[in-house]
Image (cartoon, rainbow, N blue to C red):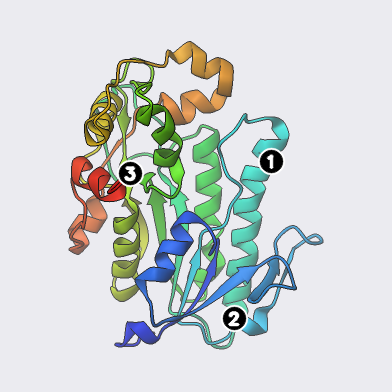
């Protein structure tokens, strides 16, 4: 089952189409036909509702004959991880992915490839903060890792049905329109930015342009399957990230945020997302021959923040 040579004419079904990554992916194939999966029957698209009833609901017939399916939907992980929030984070990924993949497996005209979002949170922070992590590294056991492992495992029905599945383990996304960078812009523009904690922890980032580029690369590469780290080749320490952002914005970065303040504000999430050190490299993308559009942190920031 090969992707048509003219990838501009693809039929692509996508969950999370209105999000930061979904919007950029739709721009990557300007002449493809996109079919967003929507939860409101009054909106145009393919209806699905993972939380409806015991097994959810989905318009399977509308998915017949798709070339590509891209699955991005999931409960946002930012915020305090209360018991209720944890359940929403986990269930939105496991239940939603299971429903989608069981449906795809049941189709007569199955898609050729499924790109499913995952996250670098699947790895536990190592004991040594500068230890390099690639796709062959041991998977984690903390809350985020458990969620990501269940998320990826939920694609099993699609794989068993012969659909090529690629897991996109996405790092910190650099984009002016959303994600972590957008949250940082206001304080940094005001000259109130600074390192987080001691600043030695590694941040594994990727430009929004390379998320789109790598996704397209995997769709068009018939031999690609399995897990791929969607991170740039040069992860940076938080201190280097901070100084680069300040330099691009021409602002000082002299106001550090102590770790204890973050723990008061965000609880467990601060240690898992803001203070953890994950020095992750995209080994499998590099081995497959993907050439990054924005390989360096400064070029990625300058592109994302042009005219900011």
Nearest the viewer among 178 and 74 is 178
- Residue placed under numbered mark 3 in the picture: 308
Mark drawn on residue 63: 2
Seen at 20% across and 41% down, the residue is: 298
| Label 3: element kind | loop
Seen at 66% across and 84% down, the residue is: 61
- Residue placed under numbered mark 1 in the picture: 87
Seen at 69% across and 41% down, the residue is: 87
Q: Say whether residue 136 is left or right of residue 102.
A: left
Badge 2 or badge 3: first in the primary sequence: 2
Inter-mark Cα distance, 2 to 3: 40 Å
Horizontal and vertical percent position of residue 24: 41, 62
- Pick the quarter of the image with the C terminus: top left
Residue 152 in the image: above or below residue 302: below
- Pick the quarter of the image with the N terminus: bottom left
Seen at 54% across and 40% down, the residue is: 146
């Amino acid at each position: 089952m090969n992707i048509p040579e003219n990838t501009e004419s693809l039929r692509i079904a996508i969950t999370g189409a209105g999000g930061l990554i979904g919007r950029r992916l739709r721009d990557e194939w300007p002449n493809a036909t996109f079919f967003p999966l929507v939860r409101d029957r009054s909106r145009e698209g393919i209806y699905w509702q993972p939380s409806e009833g015991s097994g959810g609901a989905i318009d399977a017939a509308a998915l017949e004959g798709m070339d590509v399916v891209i699955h991005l939907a999931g409960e946002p992980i930012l915020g305090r991880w209360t018991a209720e929030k944890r359940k929403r984070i986990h269930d939105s990924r496991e239940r939603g992915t299971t429903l989608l993949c069981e449906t795809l497996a049941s189709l007569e005209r199955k898609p050729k490839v499924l790109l499913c979002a995952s996250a670098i949170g699947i790895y536990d922070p190592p004991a040594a903060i500068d230890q390099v992590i690639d796709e062959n590294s041991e998977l984690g056991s903390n809350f985020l890792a458990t969620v990501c492992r269940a998320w990826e495992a939920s694609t099993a029905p699609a794989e068993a049905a012969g659909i090529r599945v690629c897991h996109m383990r996405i790092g910190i996304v650099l984009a002016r329109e959303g994600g972590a960078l957008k949250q940082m812009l206001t304080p940094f523009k005001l000259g109130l930015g600074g390192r987080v904690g001691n600043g030695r922890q590694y941040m594994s980032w990727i430009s929004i342009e390379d998320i789109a580029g790598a996704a397209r690369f995997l769709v068009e590469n018939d031999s690609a399957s399995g897990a791929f780290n969607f991170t740039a080749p040069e992860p940076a320490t938080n201190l280097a990230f901070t100084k680069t952002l300040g330099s691009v914005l021409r602002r000082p970065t002299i106001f550090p945020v102590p770790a204890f303040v973050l723990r008061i504000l965000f609880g467990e999430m601060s240690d898992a997302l803001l203070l953890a050190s994950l020095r992750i490299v995209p080994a499998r993308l590099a081995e497959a021959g993907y050439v990054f559009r924005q390989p360096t942190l400064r070029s990625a920031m300058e592109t994302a923040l042009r005219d900011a």
